[in-house]
Image: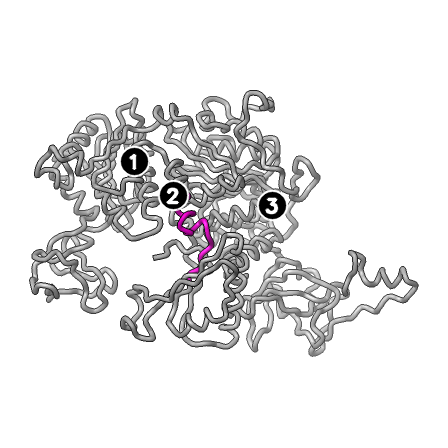
Amino acid sequence: MAAEDGVPQGEQLALAGLPAPRRRRPRTAGPVVAAATRAVARVHVDVVPAHLDRTFEYVVPQSMDDDARPGCRVKVRFAGREVDGYLLERTDEPEHDGELAPLRRVVSPVAVLAPEVLRLARAVADRYAGTLGDVLRLAVPPRHARVEAEMIAVGAAGQEPAGRARPGGPGGPAGPDPVPDPVPTGRDHVPTGRDPAPGPSAWAALRGGRAFLDHLAAGRSPRAVWTALPGPPGQDWPAAVAEAVAATTRSGRGSVVVVPDARDLDRLAAALTAGGVPPWAPGADGGFVRLEADAGPAPRYRAFLAALTGSAQVVVGTRAAAWAPVADLGLVVCWDDADDLHSEPRSPYPHVREVLVARAEQAGCAALLGGHTRTTEAQQLVDLTWARPLQPERSVVRERTARVRALTSVELAREGAAAAARLPAPAWRTARDALASGPVLVQVPRAGYLPVVACARCRAVARCRACSGPLALGAADAVPQCTWCGTLAGAWRCTECGSTALRSVRVGSDRTAEELGRAFPGVPVRVSGAGSATGVLARVESRPALVVATPGAEPVAEGGYAAALLLDAAVSTARASLRVGEEALHRWMTAAALVRPASAGGTVVLVGDAAPAPTQALVRWDPVGFAERELAERRSLDLPPAVRVAAVTGTRDAVTAFLARVRVPAGGTVLGPVAVDAPETAGAPGSLDSPVRALVRVPLAAGGELAATLAASASVRSARREGGTVRVQVDPKEML
C-alpha cells in the first residue's frame, strides 16, 4: 500500500478514525493453499532476455512456508517451462492484480544470495549496463548438494550467519567512516598502543603505512592506493596483505582479498598462515578460505558456504572471491589491479577493482588497491580523494630495487653491427656475470617458437589466405600455420613479390630458450609459460639457471634473481593501444620486482627501443609519476578513465538500430560506427555481416545515465527480437 510521510496508509486511516482496509490476499490458479503470512514471493527468474530483467511474483504454498527463505534457490514455472530463480523477498500483498502461480519447488532452504551481495550485484549490473542475472551467475557459485549436506551436518549451513559486533555499533554493517588520513604527521598521530606485526613490518617502508594498519586495527575504514616495493620474504607484498588482514581481524571484522592467479594465491595463503590467520577447517570458527573457480565445484561451494555463514572470517581468491558474502566486512583488497586476469570475460564484463570499490562504498569498509605499478584508474581515485596514496620514499626505493639499465640503439651505438643482435654483448655479459651467483630471468613478450613470420625478400608479414591471420612456425613444424583459424599454408606464396621463402619477425620463448642454450653451454634453461612443455612454473631454486618466461608467467626465485633480461622491449610498446605504455611498464616492473636489490648485485637490463615514457619510468622506478602524467594526458584528450566510454559492437544494421534508441547524455558524443577486425567473423570486409563498432563517450558524471539508456535499448532489442548481433561493453579495455 502507498505511504505518506513515512506513515503506512493503514495507520493513517486509523488515526483519522476510519477502518483500515482489508489485506488483499493473492489469488492463485488451482487448488493451492497459500502460506498464512507473507504468501507472496518476489522471485528473480534466471532467464537470458534483457527485457525480463525484473522480479516476478509467485505464491508461497503452505507446504513450503518454512523453507522458502529470502535468498534461497527455487524452481518456478515461467513461459511454459520450469526454470531456476532466487527468492528475493516475501510480502503480504501482491502488486499483480491477476492470479499468481505457485512456487514449484524450493531447491534448498540455504539462503545463498545474501542481501549485501544482491545490492552489490544490482549496482554492478546498473554500472555496466547489464542484467542482474548475468551478474548473479558470477557472484553465486552453482549448488553442490553433497557439500551442502556436509556443511549442514556440521552446523555450518542452513542457518543465519552469526553477526560480529563492529566497533561503533552493535551488529550489522556500520555506515561509512570519514576517510581517515593514512599519512599522519608526528604532530597529529596518536599511537594506538598496538603492534600490528612483531618484527620487521612490510608497511614500515611506506609513508603512512603504520598509520594505515592502526586505523584497521581500531575498526576504522581507510581507503588507500598502495605502491608496493620488492622485498625479502616477510616484507614482500604477501606479508603486507597478511598484516592488513590480521589487523582487520583483530577489530572483529572480515576481509576479502582478490589476487590475479593461483600462484599469487599460494603465496598469500602461506603469508596468512605465517601471520597468524590459519586456514579454515569444517566445524571451526575463524580463519581463511580460498575461493577460486578453478578449484572445482565442490571446494568452491564449500568455501562459499563457510563465508556465507560467518564460519570463515577471511576469503582470499581470484575473481570469484570479490563477491564472497563475508560477515561484518571490514576490508577489501585488490592486488595488482593492472593484471588482465581481473577483467571478467563474461557479460557484463566487470573489473574486480570496480566491484570492490562499489562494495567498499556500500559496506562502508576499508579498501586497499595495491601493485608494483599504479593504474590510471587507481591514480584517479587518489586525485578524487576517494583514496590516499601509500608509497615509499625515494631513499627506500633506491635501497630495495635492482639497478635498471636500458639498452637502446643509442646505448648500443658503440657496439657496431653487434648492436642489431637480439642479445647484445652488454646483456650477454650481464647474464654471464649474474649466473655465478644465482638464476637469471629472461622475459620474452611472446610464447611459441616463431609466432610471426614474413616474406624473406620483401619483409611483408605472411598471412593466411583463408582469414588473413598471421602465420607462425613451431619448433618442429616444416609448414607454417595460421594463428587465427589453424589452416596449414603449405603452398604459401607472398602476394607482394611472389617469393616462397620465410624469415622470422618475432621470436618466441621456445626459440629464445634454444638460442640461450647454445650461448650458455652447460647452464640449465627452463621455460615457463602456458604453451611450454612444463607449463607455468611457480618457483625455481636459487642455483644458477636461465629461466625464460612470458609476461605473467615469471616464477619466484628463492632469494631473488641475480639479474633479469627484458628482451624485445620495442615489441611491448609497438602496438596501437591506449594502454600500451601502462601495460608495458606493468610487465617490466612485475619481472624486475623479482630481482635482488642493487646492494646485493641485482641488475635489470631492458633491451630494445621501447617508448621513452615507460622506459624512463622503469629506469627511475617511478610508476607513480608515470601514472600521474598518463592520467593528465588522458584528461586533456577526453580519454578513459577521465570520461566514461561504452563500445557497441555487432553487425551494422543491428548496431545502427541499437544506437538510434540511445539518448546520449549532455556533453556526450557518438564515434562511428566503423569496421573492426574480427577474424572469427565470416563476413567479408564491407558486407552487411562484417562487424562494426561505435563508441559512446560521455562525461564521467553522466556514466550512470549512459548505462541506463544502453540497458533500456538492449531491453527493447530483446523484446522485439531484432536480428543481428550486438555486444555492449562499458569501459572497454581498448578503444582502437
Badge 2 or badge 3: first in the primary sequence? 3
Identify which residue is drawn at 20% across, 41% down. 608
SS at badge 3: helix
Q: Position of residue 281 (x, y in %)?
A: 53, 41
Query: From the image, which quarter does the N terminus lie in?
Result: bottom right
The answer to whether residue 448 is above or below residue 525 is below
The answer to whether marks 1 and 2 mark residues whose Cβ atoms lie closer than 8 Å is: no
Count the marks. 3
Residue 616 numbered mark, or none: 1
Residue 363 numbered mark, or none: 3
SS at badge 1: helix
Amino acid found under the numbered disc labelled 2: Glu
Q: Nearer the viewer, residue 120 or 419?
A: 419
Q: Residue furthest right?
A: 17
Q: Position of residue 530 (x, y in %)?
A: 29, 49
- Does residue 643 belong to the magenta stretch? yes
Q: Which residue is mark 2?
A: 630
Residue 657 numbered mark, or none: none
Distance between the alpha carbons at the discs numbered 1 and 2: 13 Å
Locate residue 200: give its quadrant. Answer: top left
Disc 2 crowd rating (10 Å Cα; few below 14, some 14-19, many 20+) is some
